[in-house]
Amino acid sequence: MEMPKNISTLIWTAVGGAVLCAVVGFTWGGWVTGGTASKESAAAARDAVVVALAPICVDRFNRQPDAATKITELSKTSTWDRGNVIAKSGFATMPGAKDAESDVARACAEILANPPTPKS
């Protein structure tokens, strides 16, 4: 069996095409490594937990007898400290947990200080 004279050119062309395909895929094609996929899925799961637990915190806060007064006080607190106020109050501490979840406390404080407007 006789090898073609331009086999080296064909091999290098295939290697270049594979490299180009990888560069295009990772740059513009949306491909990610396993590590990046793990980080992104962990962040998405954490965000989903915050979205699920923040309304529970809001409900627990609103059930206290002087909730309207406390919301007014919370609104007067600086935006960066509102999460700490909610965390210290205990409303962001979910049953079975020892401490308040800081992301849940921040989301809860944001909802309480800036309630969503009802849709018509």
Image (tube, helix red, strand yellow):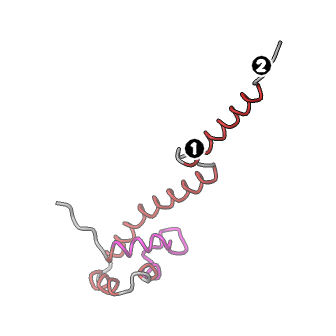
Q: Is 71 situated above or below 60?
A: below
Q: Is 109 situated above or below 10?
A: below
At a point 38% along the width and 76% down the height, the residue shown is: 109
Residue at mark 1 to residue at mark 2: CA–CA distance: 30 Å
Q: Is 4 situated above or below 41?
A: above
At a point 33% along the width and 75% down the height, the residue shown is: 112
Dot 1 alpha-carbon crowd within 10 angstroms: few under 14, some 14 to 19, many 20 or more: few
Horizontal relation, residue 72 to residue 25: left or right: left
Q: Secondary structure at mark 2?
A: loop
Q: Position of residue 106 (x, y in %)?
A: 43, 74
Horizontal relation, residue 25 to residue 60: left or right: right
Q: Residue furthest top?
A: 1
Quarter in which the C terminus is drawn? bottom left
Horizontal relation, residue 82 to residue 100: left or right: left
Q: Residue furthest front?
A: 5
Q: Amino acid at mark 1?
A: Val
According to the picture, the residue beneath numbered tag 1 turns out to be: 24
Q: Secondary structure at mark 1?
A: helix
27, 69: nearer the viewer:
27
Dot 2 alpha-carbon crowd within 10 angstroms: few under 14, some 14 to 19, many 20 or more: few
According to the picture, the residue beneath numbered tag 2 turns out to be: 4
Q: Position of residue 51 (x, y in %)?
A: 41, 62
Write the start and end of the magenta stretch as one range: 85-111
At a point 49% along the width and 74% down the height, the residue shown is: 102
Q: Residue 113 sits in which quadrant?
A: bottom left
